[in-house]
Image (cartoon, rainbow, N blue to C red):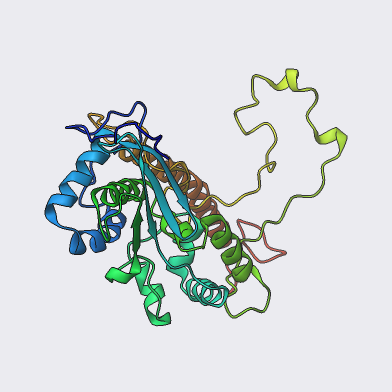
Amino acid sequence: MRLPGRPEPQPTKNPRKVRGGVRLARERASEAWASLRWLRVKEQNASQEVQLEGVEYARLGQTRRLDIFTGYVEGLVQGRMPRAYQARLTVSTFSDDEINSVVAAMADSAVYAAKLLSRELPPTIEDAFGPLGLKLFPVLPEDIRVTCTCGHSGWCKHACCVAELMADRLAGDPTLMLTLRGVPMDELVERLRQLRARPGSAHAAPLPVYNPSAPRTAADTGGPLHESLRTFWDGQSEPGLLDLPIEPPAVSHPLLRRLGPSPFQGASFPLVGLLATCCEVISHEVVNQNAIPEAQEADSADQNQGSERPSGTLQNDPPTV
């Protein structure tokens, strides 16, 4: 409330500066498919001038706070007036039945299941929602309901600023769209894993089986640790200790996918690409080294089989006609 006799606050010529505000962290590239899909509604319904002002607000860091909740994104955007404006972008969330249908459809597809279990949202994710009559990203104007305390109806520059910041977040983590629709990634992965691992289920997939070695006794432990420091990392002091198959992973670069995008922006070389190349080289060498002894063992078995003699005969005996 304004006190009696106090003059009405006037807008400044330029937006009031905000210290430590939320600003665009990266320039969205053409491969940021999630950002482009999120911005379609804004670009089709907001004027060009309003969009440019919203982008400028996002670059300047005029947003004091940005929150992503189930069903809406909310930002506190500072403009030319003393009080910041509260802009909210609301989307509809999926019902429990719709979520069950989505999870079942993804469990039926090995491609989607592998991607989602590695916490990756593929660009073709809409193909899983389309047959169900659903869509993950907004398409129509009514898919996003815009409200702002500035008093303007529809897309204002403050709402455009919030949309740009949300698009920036989606560029780094497209799974945030699932959170916005009411399906957090952690919950989706857990339900998908349970559905595919359920015995007798139509979505069940073969799970890797690990046959452990026989329990080791105290005599097989190899003595105190300090006595095996020289050979601890050789992996040969206790053969059979790690009885695991060596094969390429089902999903490429699973560790890099769990780590997410590189935090170093503007680097002279792509760090993630370099680490991916290192992982591929190491995996290739390990798999080849594991395949060489198996091939040698097979050749040795073939040679031994060809040199076997019938029982009761000597090596120098003439062949029986």
- Look at the image and tell me in which quarter the N terminus lies: top left
- Farthest right residue in view: 218
Q: Please name whichever residue, 190 or 63, is drawn nearer the observer in this view of the structure.
A: 63
The picture places residue 52, in percent across and down from the top left corner, at: 16, 47
Q: Residue at coordinates 35% horizontally, 39% vertically from top-left?
A: 84
Q: Please name whichever residue, 193 or 179, is drawn nearer the observer in this view of the structure.
A: 179
- Farthest left residue in view: 48
Q: Quadrant of residue 100?
A: bottom right
In the rendered view, tell whether residue 13 sits above or below residue 245: above
The picture places residue 65, in percent across and down from the top left corner, at: 41, 39
Question: Is residue 175 shown to the viewer in this render?
Answer: no
Q: Residue at coordinates 75% horizontally, 50% vertically from top-left?
A: 213
* 13 sits left or right of 279 in the view: left
- Look at the image and tell me in which quarter the C terminus lies: bottom right
The picture places residue 186, in percent across and down from the top left corner, at: 56, 55
Q: Quadrant of residue 262?
A: top left
* Count of marks, rendered view: 0
In the rendered view, tell whether residue 16 sits above or below residue 159: above
Q: Residue at coordinates 35% horizontally, 70% vertically from top-left?
A: 126
Q: Please name whichever residue, 35 or 277, is drawn nearer the observer in this view of the structure.
A: 35
The picture places residue 70, in percent across and down from the top left corner, at: 50, 58
Question: Is residue 251 shown to the viewer in this render?
Answer: yes
Q: Please name whichever residue, 302 or 227, is drawn nearer the observer in this view of the structure.
A: 227
Q: Quadrant of residue 59?
A: top left
